[in-house]
Each structure stands twice: as structure tokens, then as C-alpha cells.
Amino acid sequence: MDFNEEQIQRYSRHILLQDVGVEGQEKICNARVLIVGAGGLGAPIAFYLAAAGIGTIGLIDGDTVDLSNLQRQIIHFTEDVNKPKVLSAKEKIERLNPDVKVITYHKLFTSENAFDIIKDYDFVVDGTDNFPVKFLINDACVLAGKPFSHGGILRFDGQTLTYKPGTACYRCLFHAPPPPGAVPTCSQAGVLGAIAGMLGTIQAAEVLKYFTGAGDLLTNRLLSFNAKSMEFRTINVHPNSNCPVCGKHPTVTTLIDYEQAVCEIKR
């Protein structure tokens, strides 16, 4: 693609990077990325990918903006309360960078629509806050051969890994979701707002590294951090031959909608 003068100026700090340059920025601008969840993680992920010039960003989220979201979901403003999150996020992205095409899906990501939605994208980002959908994203991407970034936050902690076909997937580490109610959600246990930004920007960086080829991805590595101690830890992992979805004898060959945990927070 031929950049005009405005685009050259907009993306100049990328173009100046030896590991990105014009060719890398072209790859970014031609990329199609699906973000599942337009909340705490999805907000900074979408903002940074839009700023970087990702050509097409898909946003899927069936929720509307709640006042309690604004402590961490920075893409939504006070006047957006009760507005569908995907529409609120689309408005901000288009104001930030009109180069970016935004496709919205105001619905839940389920076993019925997962394959049909992800087929149009080059990379999928997990910005969700519950285990059933995280496993659904993993299984859909593994079975469809799509790379994705996993991310999870709770209280003061965050973790992430990147998957490409042939590397360790989320189920290689965690075989199945915990029983409903066994692990609290952010709405039950709380989360420090800035944690979402810390992890979301790491996930956005992984997406940009994937398309440009710069650096080493978090494949076969689980990165975790605790903001109270500000300690980061990287654990090397390997593809699990007994993994139920990507192992030698897979038992998960179709998508599963696991039971969602019910929030019992007292208001």
C-alpha cells in the first residue's frame, strides 16, 4: 500500500523502528484482529491497536456500559453508560484513527457463532473475564488454526500467553474450567483498575509483534505479574501431548459452552 503524507506522519515512530519500518507498518495496516470482550482488557487493547493502525478491528461483546466499568474500561466514558460496549468502543476508535475499519458484534461469543466470526480474522485476542469463554476462544482458535493472545486479570494479578499453531495452548496448562463458583470473577473479588491497562498493553504489543515479526512472542511461555510487589515471572511451558484439544489423542473436537459462574456481589 502507498501511505499518504498524513499516514507517514501518523505512523512515523513505527516506521523509524528498524524492526518495523514501512514494510512492517504495511502489515499492521493490512491486518484483521478480533477482540473478544470490550471491557477491562479489550479497552486498552483496542485503543493501542487502533492507534497503531490495525486495518480491521472486530469487537464482540453482548454487554452494555455500566458505571462500575469506568474504573478500568478506559475506552468508555460517563456519557456511555447503558450504551452497548461495542458501539461505545467503535466511536472512540474512529475518533482516534479514521484509517481503522471497525466491525461490531453486539452479542455473546458462543459455540454457535465462534467459527463463523473468527474465520474472517488473522489474529484473535482474549479480552474476556470468565473461564468458559476463555476455553471457548482457545478451542475455536486451535481447531481453526488461528493464533490468539490469552489474558486474564484478578485483584492485583495478571497473566498472558500467545498461541500459534504448534505451540502450547491454554488447555495444555489448564485442562478444563474450574467448577462454577470455585474461582471468583472480577465483579466478585475486585480488580485494581490499572492492572487491565498493564496486561492489555502487553497483549496489544504481542499482536503488533506477531504481524511485524519483531522480537519473540510469548509462545510456550506464560507471563504473570503481581502489581503489589511489581514482580513479573515467565514460566516456560511446552505443548502437552495429553492436551484434550491439541494433543495426540484429542477429546475436544467440537466447541463447548461451559456453564457461566453467577455473580453474587452485594451492592
Image (cartoon, helix red, strand yellow):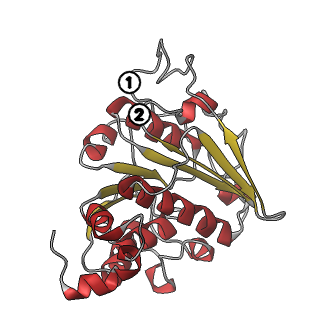
**Picture quadrant of residue 232:** bottom right
In the image, residue 135 lies at what x, y percent? 51, 37
Query: Mark 2 sits on what residue?
Result: 165
**Picture quadrant of residue 98:** bottom left
Residue 153 as seen in the image, left or right of residue 228: left
Give, as a three-letter code, the residue at label 1.
Thr
| Extreme residue in the left direction | 2
Residue 36 as seen in the image, left or right of residue 184: left
Residue located at (43% from left, 39% from top): 164
Query: Mark 1 sits on what residue?
Result: 254
* Tag 1 secondary structure: loop
In the displayed structure, 77 sits above or below 100; it is: below
In the image, residue 151 lies at what x, y percent? 57, 51
Q: How many angstroms separate mark 2 from mark 1 (CA)?
A: 17 Å
Residue located at (70% from left, 41% from top): 235
Residue located at (28% from left, 70% from top): 22
In the displayed structure, 168 sits above or below 46; it is: above
In the image, residue 9 lies at what x, y percent? 31, 87
Q: Nearer the viewer, residue 1 or 114?
A: 1
| Extreme residue in the front direction | 18
> Between tags 2 and 1, which lies in front?
2
In the image, residue 253 lies at what x, y percent? 40, 21
* Tag 2 secondary structure: loop
Residue located at (47% from left, 11% from top): 249
